[in-house]
Amino acid sequence: MVDAEGGLSLTIARVVQRLRGSSLHSQLERQARVSPGPAPAVVPAVYTLLSLRFPSPCHPAAPPEHMKEPLAYMRKAQGSWEKRILKSLNSMCTELNIPLAQKRPASEQKELLNKWNEMGTDEPDLSLFRPVYAPKDFLEVLMNLRNPNYENGEQPSFRNHLGLIQVPLKVKDIPELKEDFSELGLNIGQLGIDDSAQVPPEFFENEHVRVGQKVLAEQDSAAAQQYVRQGCPTALRAELWALILNISNQPEDILYYEQLKSNVIQHNLLVDSLIYKDVKLTASNDDYYFVFEDYLYQVLLCFSRDTSVLEHFAYSSATPPKSYIRGKGELQKSFCFVGVIPFHGFSMYVAPLCFLYHEPSKLYQMFREMYVRFFFRLHSISSHPSGIVSLCLLFETLLQTHLPQLFYHLREIGAQPLRISFKWMVRAFSGYLATDQLLLLWDRILGYNSLEILAVLAAAVFAFRAVNLMEVTSLAAAEAVLADLSTLKVVPLLQIFLFATVT
């Protein structure tokens, strides 16, 4: 009984620690002053925060690194990858003769403050800067992952896996995915489908909007999470997502954002140039997102200074690199840089949110929450079911199992499907799907609290284009068939693949 009580005490302590400093904590404090019990709406908000943010339960005696990642070879691979990224970053500093971080001169601070809302008009010379890595570099690392304790002969089922990912992780099959994503069933109303045999779309949409308004009125985050599994009405999406992620944009949140902005004004980091370069190479050239260039700079520059982002490293397999600004004395140094190093395409995690949020502090909070709950898993090496390694393996397993002819054909001509789909999954399809379809996909990520839907959609895209792909004879030809995803309808693709596939 003592052990059970000890375990409970530990859990409560962790819950309190996780809540402290969050906007939900201040909501609870305000409520406590008004009445002794928590407000009904706050209880589900606490539940949602914990279910989304906490890592899976771990044995109390397990060392901290096991909570982050239980498999030693995954931890080692992530460590090696981080060293490689830092080496690339440091060599760039040496080549260009610039520090990782330095204080801006007063004149530069004033200039940046004056043009804060129109940074997109600035044209700094970025020709010498290059992205630290691109998705294809990361894929090469994942392809070389091996479990040193594992012999191919031991598990015949895995020995037959002919994809690029060669680690024996458990991934779901179609029957399990059907059960998990049951609300996507063919007989259940969905937003994002033009016609339905069961219910006229306008009738379903009107009723769905009414239910969504009720969920918002009750401020029930658990109900909101369940609700968005069938898609969000456009007019309600911004508020529903904020409710699920517990973003309230209180005065203290706005003040925090202003402090981050002040940090950007005062200090110049090497990653600032990498952020500029990434936005210029990606979002600025995108028909949907180029208009949000200023927002992207503001959000990403503030993100690179936000020490609260460090919290997610408690349950990420990654560790944060840090930079310090040295003063005249050895002791005069201040912490300046939070180590999420942007790769090619990183700004595309922010771009779709700009359609929903126009207030910089709220847009910033939404991105930060989406990142620390979901997106960080797409560029770190781990065995988590929503981690990029598991997503790659799930995608390859689905294709090999349910479209074997297509899989073998592409493999034989040197066009391994993962070489094409990897960039989609790493960017959560941002920049590949039309924005309305992307937001319907991200509804489901939030609703199911899982990134597995990305692998399912990637497999569904190959299934949809299977006839054309069976005719190609090279990787370049296969890439050409799948070059444009902007006309695809996400929900029907997912439904057909999951519920009309013979298993």
Image (spheres, grey):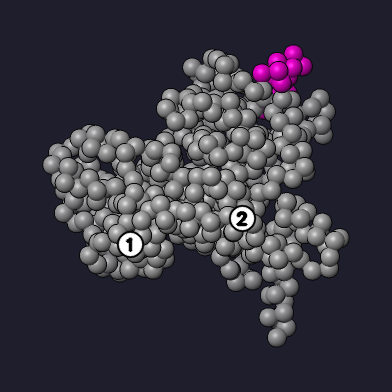
Relative to residue 446, is residue 476 depicted above or below?
above
| Residue at image point 34% right, 64% down | 187
Q: Nearer the viewer, mark 2 or mark 1?
A: 1
| Residue at image point 42% right, 27% down | 287
Q: Amino acid at mark 1?
A: Gln
In front of the other: 342 or 172: 172
Residue 110 counted in the magenta span? yes
Point out the tag, 2 or 1, that comes first from the N-terminus: 1
Instruction: Determine if residue 56 is in view.
Output: yes
Q: Position of residue 165 (x, y in %)?
A: 34, 52
Residue 105 counted in the magenta span? yes
Image mark for residue 198:
1
The boundaries of the magenta stretch are: 101-115
Relative to residue 340, is residue 189 depicted above or below?
below
Q: Position of residue 279 (x, y in %)?
A: 51, 27
* Position of residue 156 in the picture relative to residue 425 (left or right): left
Q: Secondary structure at mark 2?
A: helix
Residue carrying label 2:
216
* Position of residue 330 in the picture relative to residue 490 (left or right): right
* Position of residue 418 in the picture relative to residue 294 (left or right): left
Q: Amino acid at mark 2?
A: Leu
**Residue reaching furthest to the bottom:** 1
